[in-house]
Amino acid sequence: MKMTLDDKKKLARGLAWTGAVFSLVVSVMLIVNYLQLKSVDPLESPALKALVEQLHQNPNDEVLKENIRALDFMIRKAYFTSQWQIKTGTLMLILGVLVLILALRWGKSLRNELEELESINKNPFLDKRQARLGVIYAGVGIFALALLSGFFSSNLLSDYDASELTATTPETPAVEIVMAQEAEAVDVPNSEPKEVEAQLESTFEEEVQSEVKEIVKEDNPKPEKVSEPKQATASWPSQAEMRKQVPFFRGPDGDGVTYQKGFAKSFDGASGENVLWKVSVPKHGYNSPIIWDNKLFLTGADNSARVVYCYDKNTGKLLWEAAADNIPGSPATMPKVTEDTGLAASTMATNGNSVFALFATGDLIALDLTGNRIWAKNLGVPDNHYGHSSSLIIYKDKLLIQYDTNRGGKLIALSTADGSQKWETVRDVKISWASPVLVNTGKREELILTADPLVAGYDPETGKELWNVSCMMGEVGPSVGYANGVVYAANEYATMAAIKLGDTPEIIWEQQEYLPEVSSILATNGLAVVATSYGVIAAYDAQTGEKYWEHEASSGFYSSPVYADGNIYAIDMNGNLSVIKAGKEFEIVSESKLGEKAFGTPVFSNGKMYLRGVENLYCIGANCNGRKSSTYK
């Protein structure tokens, strides 16, 4: 149907009015949001300060500590939600103004000269015209004010701009391979970062938990420097060999399933019951241990150094330590990270010939099993307002790295032998803190990654994307679970989706009742298990999504639940370990107390369980018969 001139004029007027009203509403919302942020600083909550002041008077009040943590969590979530709303509102305002301008120009083009002359001869219209001009000028002023409000509001987190960390750090830096004998000592300035979001948590964490002690036990001597490094071999272990070890975060497949048996089900950290040994870790880190044969590896970091530690898993003796230093491209000033992420959140990886460690600075180091440096490089400082936490995983001769930051997402494959790039795949996703998981579908090996908005599978040999399903949103932290051809992905404030793989992967069920914030999903024994940051662990039918049971712990979970010898092991942030039967009916096997905060995931090897607290590393044995071991420290 052909539009008449009058129809076009009516449409132009309608679009203009729609654009004007829409822009006005968005403008008012942006201005109000800006004024609220200015009047009540979300990063300086009076309520939180009041609770912290009460904690000074009652330092042993556990309920008060939990209230502080809960309030801080709510403040941070509300703050970042507000930032998203401001940015989205600014874009919506620009769109509305564009519609208004284009509609007005179109309407003006439809008026002929005769109409213009007639309108001038009518004095009443001149008055209306002046009034309309006044309204337009006022509207433009409101729009401009709203745009300025959105601009200045959305820049509250500008301190997290990673490009300020070093003047010479490009997005994809040219990196060099550094051999141990070529490295020379370089002084690294020790500067304190000016956290923005971290101000809240660092304030009360000083009251809730003591600083991590940087003390090396007298019987843990510092390693001697070795000048001649060993080169990594080109061979790689079979899947059967890998499943005898703990080479990655959450075990040999990165999915939280342990293939060994005979572990302790209870202990007491305070008395030493069933604790074979306990040692202090010199530098702080939230990463979990990895194990190869009799050697246990983990990392620690602060503003002065990033360090890899190797312990004898049978005695707890520190065998050696190696610093990730003298790396070209490494920032002189440490990235701004939050207290609950830190500089050493990524769990290491090993193939039995070498060990690999990644820090929040972007520094990546490869060492042989005796502590000699093989190669090192900087991947570029990750633009990350919490700190980088994605853990490493290995496929054959490739070290695989999920590097999803605010500057864009990518999956990187480096040679385990020399650090050279094998391939790089750009990902159309937002920033993510999740870790990659290797699965064998029966037809092929796949590397599964999750971020906003995609859960996707990649060929670990080439980096080619095999499939993707759009179902995630928000700041994704949990890694996926996998069992029997189904991938389980979840994130807090989003969803938990079970994705059936095949020619066309599809979601077979979803649930939004219990969703994890950090803890990864465990899929085993017909169950899909989630642990939340507010203290609930729940099990669902892996095929249908029916909820079987839920259990409320004493605190929230950052650690991921793992499966070992028929049981689910889950340790909460207060260091309380729950051992639950891996079945459809809820059955608590035991509950134990570590005696300190814990964020790392339990690790199992040769009848022993290893737990990392915020200060100490523990070895739990099943052969103590309820007695304190003579080697307990």
Image (cartoon, rainbow, N blue to C red):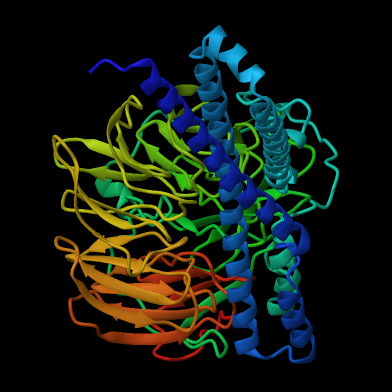
Residue 448 visible, this orientation: yes
Residue shown at 35% from the left, 87% from the top: 590
Which quarter of the rendered picture does the N terminus lie within?
top left
Q: Is residue 616 left or right of residue 9?
A: right
Q: Is residue 186 above or below residue 12?
A: below
Residue shown at 53% from the left, 32% from the top: 95
Image coordinates for residue 50, horizontal then vertical, percent: 76, 81
Q: Is residue 205 left or right of residue 556?
A: right
Foreground pick, 510 / 219 = 510
Q: Is residue 1 left or right of residue 328?
A: left
Image coordinates for residue 60, horizontal then vertical, percent: 69, 90
Foreground pick, 73 / 541 = 73
Residue shown at 40% from the left, 28% from the top: 234
Which quarter of the rendered picture does the C terminus lie within?
bottom right
Image coordinates for residue 171, horizontal then vertical, percent: 63, 26
Q: Is residue 515 above or below residue 551?
A: above
Foreground pick, 116 / 188 = 116
Residue 216 visible, this orientation: no
Image coordinates for residue 629, horizontal then vertical, percent: 51, 84
Residue pushed farthest top?
A: 113
Q: Quadrant of residue 226?
A: top right
Foreground pick, 32 / 272 = 32
| Image mark count | 0
Q: Is residue 192 left or right of residue 507?
A: right
